[in-house]
Amino acid sequence: MEKIYDIRNLGCAHCGSKIEEAINKLEEVDSAVLNFQLKRLKINGEHSEGLLARMNEIAQSIEPDVEIVPSAGRKKHAHHHDHEHEHHHDEHCGCGHEHEHEHAHEHSHEHGEDGKLEIASVAFGVVLFIAAIAVHHLTELLPVAIGLYVAAYLVLGLNVLKAMVKSLTKGNVFNENFLMTVATLGAFALGEYAEAVGVVLFFRIGEMFEDFAVARSRKAITDVTELRVEEADVLRGDEFVRVDSDDIEIGDILRIKVGERIAVDGVVESGESRIDTSAVNGEPVPMTVRAGDSIMSGCINIAETFTLRATAVADDSMITKIANAVEDASSAKPKLDRFITRFAKVYTPIVIGIAAATALLGSLITGDWQKWVYSALTFLVISCPCALVLSVPLAYFSGIGASSKLGILFKGGDSIEALGKVKAIAFDKTGTLTNGSFTVTRVTSAGSLTDEELLRLCGSCEQISTHPVAESIVDYCRANDIRLSEPERSSDIAGRGVEAEVGGKAVLCGNMKLMQEKGAEVPELPQTAAGTSVYVAVDGRVEGVILVSDEVKKTSAEAVKSLKSMGIATAMFTGDVPETAAEVGSALGVDTAKGGLLPDDKLAELNALREKYGSVMFVGDGLNDAPVLAGADVGGAMQTGSDLALEAADAVFMSSEPASVVTAKKIADKTLRISYENIIFALAVKVAVLVLGLVGHPNMWLAVFADSGTAMLLILNSIRALNTKRYK
């Protein structure tokens, strides 16, 4: 059973990874995933009465002030918040944005009086520090200077000292607070007062930067999760009543006023308006909707009041699915993140060991205890791997946040990581590169049946199929008042067509492969234009062909061009006839276009593409694309596609435009690049300072930069991934 917990007062990413590892070792826990950015813990396992107490005991032994509590959920917090502050929705707002109570509680550095006190405390410490330096270097009043240094140290580092004492009482020695305390007190003992205060000052500033960066990247996630609407006007009897969104049922009629965000998925019942869909699919241009049009939840009505008939309950509506997907994605860790976490476990003890050996051996060999103990202290300052442990997942977290704003839903950091390594992208044609809205463009009879009879026969058989081509023929018949009949028997043949019995006649409707396999006689027929040819055979003889055509999506050609300019090989795999595939592929400029493919054939072609280029992505939307989506290194599905395709995909494109694939690739590339930049820079700086210390040039100011300074730079580098303008 899965359960979500909130984590309060967790300030160290490295400590968070330790807590996650320790909780995973508990007998009743199958898996534990700690999301440092969202401050949430997801537990799968047996939730016994004592589990929460044991988890808190573990957490507090690693970071003393941490508290793990059952998640009350967004809704409860929002309602609690509303009651406390007597919050009322403006009639023309309806955005459903509530501020989570725990959000303010957990992130006091960003909000309220606690944040101001934090800044004031650091500012006061800086003033004392500057005064101490001035007295130390401009006067001979050393005792006064020392007193000011001590005062500045206590103002800036008292929390560190308290946390260190608490950690020691819990038996947790090697954490950041212990390392900082030993290093700074050691510096005081050696008379390096400025260095000691400088270490805690930069440590505090580094923590503030962490809070800022994590808050900014978290906002990108919570902005999406807060799009869920709490209440809506629902028709009850003869009047509209304000009800909780969870109480909306399928078939209910909702009144959507101007400025309101739509609570559930539905179909326009009456009225006409324009809606802002940007929060859902990233599209900036409002969409006009009329009676009969489908609308996703999360969109905003910006023109006229209209009524909506609910087609899904709140939990099954699109905005809830998006919010859940984004939250789940932010918890899924990429391989690089897991590697850094494992590396940090080894790295810290090694550096501490080097520090101890340096102090002892260096002093014994040279007799210069002060120099080598000071060198060892610089090692301790840079031994905390928090910057590295935080910056890598923060980069992926930022990438997920940016992509969600642009209507791209990754299913985890591992999906972004995999896409960043992709060298080739293959597309399905129908519904992916083309609109998938087929229409009958030509009917060619072989002579014995009229065009209308041919359409009636084919439409009757195709009623059982969910393929877009089949549905287009059925829709065309109904739109042209061609009455269809129910076949006596029928069966859908995957990748071929339909076999049925209508009025005692054996009927085949499908592609040429079906005709050949069933031994149907094919007479001479005029050459058809580009499109999908559906042959109609009656009692073993083809009586005509119906041509169904599809339009290429507006961004398809530009998307292919952009991918090729990025050095990505492109391909198109389709079940459509090879002639149509070749024509569409040529028009779009893809490197490879293959037609007449069954699902297994697509998978085989994908594997061939992988052998030639390396890691490959497949983008599709149909039920038959699920196997190849699952078999690709990265699967991408258009939001308009089948549920199975969406389930199998690693990324979902809400706008259903191929341009989103280019954007996703850019985000993935940037995120992966930032992660590698962070790792290389952090390790290079730390190694450089370590080497300087070993060769006899220790400098605690350099060590401070190697720790807190590097952390600030890495964090600022990580949140660059949030800049959505770079991807457009």
Image: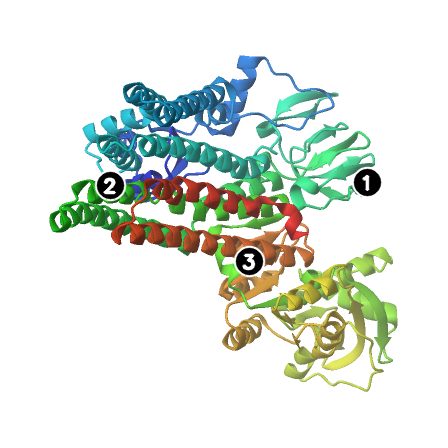
Q: Is residue 124 left or right of residue 218?
A: left
Q: Is residue 500 left or right of residue 140?
A: right
The answer to whether mark 3 and mark 1 are in CB contact below 8 A is no
Q: What residue type is labelled 1?
A: Arg
What residue sits 76% from the left and 27% below the top? 257
User: Within the image, what quadrant is residue 595 found in?
Assistant: bottom right
Q: How dense is the environment of label 2, judged by Cα within 10 Å: few (below 14), some, or many (20 and up)? A: many
Residue 365 versus residue 47 in the image, above or below: below
The answer to whether mark 3 and mark 2 are in CB contact below 8 A is no
User: Within the image, what quadrant is residue 137 found in?
Assistant: top left
Badge 1 marks a residue whose secondary structure is loop
Write down the residue under mark 1.
290
Q: How is the image coloured?
A: rainbow
Q: Which of marks 2 and 1 precedes in the sequence? A: 1
Write down the residue under mark 3.
669
Residue 313 position in % (x across, y down): 60, 36
Residue 603 position in % (x across, y down): 54, 71
What residue sits 71% from the left and 74% below the top? 581
The CA span between labels 1 and 2 is 75 Å
Write down the residue under mark 2.
374
Badge 3 marks a residue whose secondary structure is helix
Q: Which amino acid does label 3 sit on?
A: Asp
What residue sits 65% from the left and 73% below the top? 496
User: Within the image, what quadrant is residue 289 found in?
Assistant: top right
